[in-house]
Image: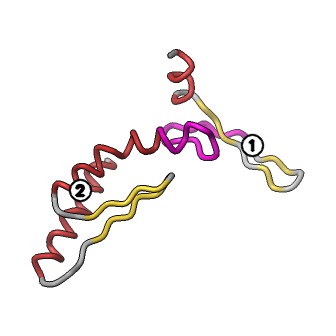
Amino acid sequence: MLWLEHYFVEHTHQTRVGDCLSAEASLISGVVQGSGIGPVSFLIFVDELAKLLEHHGVVVKLFTDDVKVYLEMYNVDDAVKLQKALDLIVEWAD
């Protein structure tokens, strides 16, 4: 499993546009996009967040590298619930 550890630490990124290649940049977090294991590792990474939000009554949809959060709004209490969910996302991200 050493290969998996190396996949998540000390990785770099370059961007190619036509024949031009950017300088290498060190990545300190995140999931490498465009990789075969990227979508699975992203889902593992955000699973805790999804469960936390669903526990608070917010609908969560995960797809590859995106998280969608929504709630049907019927009254002020629903707005408060959605704001609490957004606050939880901020706490989780910190």
72 left or right, relative to 75: right
Q: Is residue 37 magenta?
A: yes
Q: Which residue does the image show at 64% across and 46% down from the upper left?
A: 34
Crowding at label 1, few (<14), some or many (≥20) Cα neighbours within 10 Å?
few
Q: Which residue does the image show at 52% across and 45% down from the upper left?
A: 39
Q: Which residue does the image show at 29% across and 56% down from the upper left?
A: 89
Disc 1 designates what residue? 23
Tell me residue 80's x, y (percent): 14, 73
Towards the viewer: 17 or 81: 81
Label number found at residue 57:
none
Residue segment shown in magenta: 24-40
Q: Is residue 20 magenta?
A: no
Tell me residue 43's x, y (percent): 42, 44
Q: Are marks 1 and 2 in contact (CB under 8 Å)?
A: no
Q: Secondary structure at mark 1?
A: loop
Towards the viewer: 30 or 4: 4
